[in-house]
Amino acid sequence: MTNKVALIVGPGHAGLGEALANRYGQKGYTIALLGRNPDPLNDLVKILTASNISAFSVTADLASPASVSTALKEIAQKGDLQVVLYTATMRTKNKPADLTSDLLTESLASNLLGAVTVTNLALPYVKKTGDGVFLYTGSIVAAKPGTSDVEQSIGKAGLHSYVIALNKELSKSGIFAGIVTINTYIRKGKPGHMDPNVIAKAFEDLGNDKKAAEVQYH
């Protein structure tokens, strides 16, 4: 029997990527971690392996479709890519009046364009499973931008529109796309609604229920 693979793009340091890896790993998925810097990815692989979760890492630059394509080919050799969890994000403190097209383009590589690239290149692999899932991390800043997170806000607003439209397009194919809009901070080790393990359950529930394209998490 071929392994089921869950890909986590941009696990980050806030704890959500690790929580998602644990949740899907405990469900029997082999976890693939994709990011630009190998050291934090490999550190997380060690943590997951210590919990008897099968995991491996691949590096790719989300601004480079060729890099992402190569990474996905490597991932596909490990099993059937069935779940894609896009958690990559970039938050800067550039003020709106200081923003330039170059600065915005750089942040969009993580906040929006990388999601489009990963989705586009991963779809042929996921479609082979017949019932795959794409889940994306949204944020309250998409609807309520501040002066210090305008780049992230622009990216997350675009990501929201993209995922809602993608869900409509894929709905008849058996593939589900959804977004969890997080209306709180993520605090590793803090109990309650900020706990990344609790937030990760909202992602799993959305992927299982497939009733709506978006869940507002508070």
Image (spheres, rainbow, N blue to C red):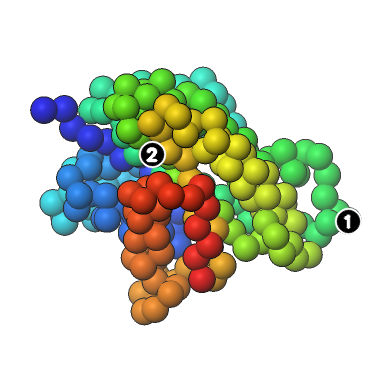
- Comes first in the chain, label 2 or label 1: 1
Secondary structure type for disc 1: helix
Q: x%, y% of residue 74?
A: 32, 24
187, 139: nearer the viewer: 139
Instruction: Tell me the quarter of the picture where residue 70 sits.
Output: top left
Looking at numbered disc 2 in the image, what kind of residue is underneath it?
Val
**In the rendered image, the vertical position of residue 133 relative to residue 200, given as above or below:** above
**In the rendered image, the vertical position of residue 120 relative to residue 9, given as above or below:** above
**In the rendered image, the vertical position of residue 24 relative to residue 189, given as above or below:** above
Q: x%, y% of residue 2?
A: 16, 27
Instruction: Tell me the quarter of the picture where residue 122 sits.
Output: top left
Horizontally, residue 133 falls left or right of residue 185, namely left
Secondary structure type for disc 2: strand
198, 71: nearer the viewer: 198
Horizontally, residue 191 falls left or right of residue 101, namely left
Q: x%, y% of residue 29?
A: 22, 42
Q: How far is disc 2 from disc 1 in space, using C-alphas?
A: 38 Å
Q: x%, y% of residue 207?
A: 37, 48
Task: State the residue position of label 1.
Answer: 97
Label annotation for residue 161: none
Q: What's the residue at 36%, 28% (across, down)?
A: 126
Tell me whether the residue at label 2 lies in contact with that at label 1, contact meaning CB atoms closer than 8 angstroms. no
Q: What's the residue at 52%, 38% (across, down)?
A: 167
Residue sitting farthest toward the bottom? 191
Label annotation for residue 133: 2
Q: What's the residue at 83%, 44% (across, down)?
A: 100
Residue 115 seen in render: no
Front label number (2 vs 1): 2
Look at the image and tell me in which quarter the N terminus lies. top left
Q: Residues within 10 Å of mark 1 (few under 14, many from 20)?
A: few
Looking at numbered disc 1 in the image, what kind of residue is underneath it?
Ala
